[in-house]
Amino acid sequence: MEIKQVNDASPERIFINFKAVDATTITLGMAICYLGGIAADVASADGIQATASTVARSITFAGIAAANVAVNGTGRAQCWGQCDSILLSQETDKTIGPVGALIAGPAGGMISSTLQNVSTVLYKYVMPTVTTNISSSLPYGKGFVRAI
């Protein structure tokens, strides 16, 4: 775990390490989940194995990938603080916001723009800090990550 110290220009951010064990690369901004926690999963042997998130795995939501991570590679995910690159779902002509609204749990590695209350995403959520209009194939937004 890496905790970047608070300063005047940047709020505190916390990062965790993970090993990508998915069949495909985990890209910058994707939501990730640890292995284990659902019946179909085998528990992680080293405690840091993770995949791009799915609805079924949202109970083990770990954070937002801080960079591209190849299959069986290791990387960092942001689990707390302001995140500038959150990959949003590819829903045409949707707007993420308003600022401070809760974003639903991860699906397919991307955060869905469907708003839900906190209890349905198990208190692990991302709140938008800017309003983002989705009009491109891989839209990114900014938000506050709370996955610890």
Image: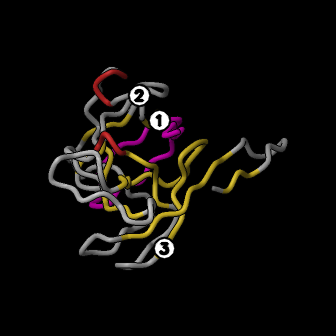
How packed is label 2: few (under 14 Cα within 10 Å), some, or many (20 or more)?
A: some
Q: Earlier in the sequence, mark 2 or mark 3?
A: 3
Three-letter residue code for mark 3: Thr
**Residue 116 drawn at (x, y percent):** 29, 24
Q: Residue furthest right?
A: 8
The residue lying toward the viewer, choosing from 124 and 39, is 39
In the displayed structure, would residue 96 be above or below residue 24?
A: above
Mark 3–mark 1 Cα distance, whole angstroms, equals 27 Å
Residue underneath mark 1: 128
Residue underneath mark 2: 123
Q: Earlier in the sequence, mark 1 or mark 2?
A: 2
The residue lying toward the viewer, choosing from 37 and 74, is 37
Mark 2–mark 3 Cα distance, whole angstroms, equals 26 Å
Tag nearer the camera, 3 or 1: 3
The residue under the point 46% across, 33% down is 127
* In-image side of 87 versus 93 (left or right): right
The residue under the point 35% across, 52% down is 33
Three-letter residue code for mark 2: Tyr
How packed is label 3: few (under 14 Cα within 10 Å), some, or many (20 or more)?
A: some
In the displayed structure, would residue 31 be above or below residue 115?
A: below
Which stretch is magenta?
128-148
Residue 74, numbered label: 3
